[in-house]
Amino acid sequence: MEYRQLGRSGLKVSALAFGTATFGGVGPLAKWGATETAQACRLLDICLEAGINLIDTANAYSRGRSEEILGEAMAGRRERLLVATKVRFRMGEGPNDLGLSRAHVVAQCEASLKRLGTDRIDLYQMHQWDGLTPLEETLEAFDTLTRAGKIRYSGISNFAGWQLVKIMATARAMGVVPPVAQQIYYSLESRDAEYELLPAGIDQGLGALIWSPLAGGLLSGKYRRGKAPEEGGRHLNDWHEPPLSDEARLYDTIEELVAIANGRGASAAEVALAWLLGRAGVASVILGARTEEQLRRNLGAADLVLAAAERERLDRVSLPRLIYPHWHQQRTIPDRLGPAAASLIEGHPAD
């Protein structure tokens, strides 16, 4: 397993991480999975054997049950793991039971620590933007928790590019500890993050943690053009998160993934994950799994190094349309964009 520096911190995280959104099966996430403690322990065993050291969860996953199960599964091996969790979404019926206010952040940190059965959170992430709470209030709360030893590092998730830059600038102006990571959606199905988030993250020193790297299973290889998905698969017209951006391009990408996978004796999922591991700004790719077989199969991506020609094939078939001002900059100043934007223009024609 490769270990990568997380942003401009000194923390090293495994190139593949494990996500626990399938733990608990309470509420809307029940359709993702309903893993309980015994199975969670087995999945964690596999992760540790493979060298994974980063486990991602959130207080909102199954209304706290995901954190509880993870805490139970970590018993006796907490020191071998980095625990990442999140705060932002509603956790009660009261007017202050959501958001990034000092009141909610501090209360939910304490609640997460209790559910996880630990004395610190290694990476505490703002799960979504809160446009009503002043950034100064949120950052002060995170800084206080950091200095109290209750969290080690902070991160953001699902922020827009301007929101990312604003929070980093505000943290520096306040003299508080800034975030070191951003957790974002990024996959061969949707490369939207290349417009702003990845270049901004590289520029500001935020390592990218990737959620839903297989687009919720769409890139697993079980969805093929003209073929019905296997039993239990979700049909494309029922897909909501992440949304499908271009069905024709998706199927073209899947065909290329399958072709490369067949030539390498790998799965389409492994190839899709290996492509992400080679993208600029990516610190770790978060795997989700309901079964041991599924997890073991996807872990093979850690040892799969794609050839330049294979990467070029995937880059070309999944290439997104450049939006303004990127197409204008690419046409007029490609030699002056700087290293942070290199991944954005790579593969796009000159005009």
Image (cartoon, rainbow, N blue to C red):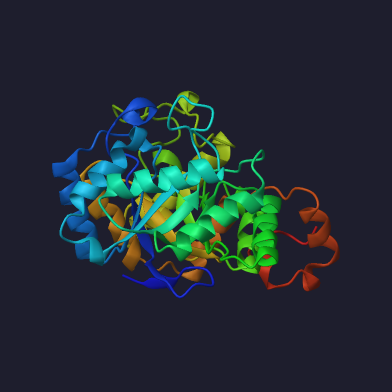
User: Residue 137 at what x, y percent from top left?
Assistant: 62, 50
| Residue 328 figure quarter | bottom right
Q: Nearer the viewer, residue 257 or 50?
A: 50
Whether residue 296 is visible to the viewer of this picture, yes or no, is yes
Q: Nearer the viewer, residue 133 or 272?
A: 133
Q: Quadrant of residue 166?
A: bottom right
* Residue 347 in view: no
Q: Position of residue 98 (x, y in %)?
A: 51, 35
Name the residue: 24% across, 66% down: 80
Task: Work out which quarter of the rendered image holds the N terminus and state it.
Answer: bottom left
Dividing the image into 4 quarters, which one contains the C terminus? bottom right
The location of residue 148, given as percent across then percent down, is 43, 62
Query: In this orientation, which residue lies closer to the viewer: 235 or 65?
Result: 65
In this rendering, is residue 247 above or below 318?
above
Residue at (64%, 55%) from the top-left corner? 164
Measured as percent of width and height from the top left, residue 38 is found at: 13, 43
Residue 118 occupies which quadrant of the picture? bottom left
Left or right? Give the position of 296 relative to 151.
Answer: left
Which residue occupies 36% across, 31% down? Answer: 29
Q: Is residue 275 left or right of residue 299?
A: right
